[in-house]
Image: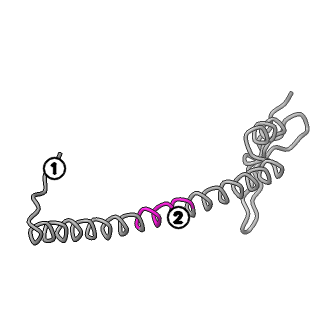
Amino acid sequence: MQLVGITQKSSNFDCSCTQFNNQLYLPYMLTNDDLDKLTSVLASKHDVKELRADMADLKELVHALIVSSDTLANSISNLTTEYAAISNQLTRHELWIKQIAEKVGLKLVAD
C-alpha cells in the first residue's frame, strides 16, 4: 500500500489528487461507501412518486374540508339571519297581543 500525492497544473485547471493502490482519488470524488450512504438517506424515484401521490390525496382532502367548512359557515350565517327575523317577528306578535289585550280589557298573566 503506497500513498502518493500528485499535483497537476495547467493554464486554468489545478488538480490535486491522491494515488492509492494504483487507483487515482480526487479530493472531491465519492467512493462506493459514500454512494451507499447517500442512497440509504436520499429518496428514490419510487419514493418521490409515492410522495406525490400522497400529496395529491392530501390536497384533495384539504380541498374537501375547505368546501365543507365553507358550507357549514354559510349555513350558520343563514341560521343567524333567520333567527334575527324570527326574533323580530316574535317581538312584534307580543306587542300586538298586548295591544289587543288592552283594547279588549283582558289582563295577561304569565304562569
Mark 1 surroundings within 10 Å by alpha-carbon count, few (fewer than 14), some (14 through 19), many (20 or more): few
74 lies above or below 1: below
Above or below, 83 against 55 in this view is below
- Residue 33, x across and y down, in percent: 81, 35
Q: How is the image coloured?
A: one colour
Residue 71's label in the rendered image is 2
Disc 1: which residue: 110
Span shown in magenta: 68-77
In the depicted structure, whether residue 48 falls above or below residue 96: above
Q: Residue at x 36, y 69 (%)?
A: 81
Query: Label 1 is placed on what type of residue?
Result: Ala
Q: Quadrant of the C terminus?
A: top left
Between marks 1 and 2 in the image, the one whose residue lies nearer the viewer? 1
- Residue in the image at 25% along x and 69% along y: 88
Looking at the image, which residue is at 75% across and 41% down?
Answer: 38
Residue 28 at x, y percent in the picture: 73, 48
Give the SS element for disc 1.
loop
Q: In what element is the residue under mark 2? A: helix
Q: Main secondary structure of the magenta part?
A: helix
Left or right: 68, with 96 as reference point: right
Q: Quadrant of residue 65?
A: bottom right
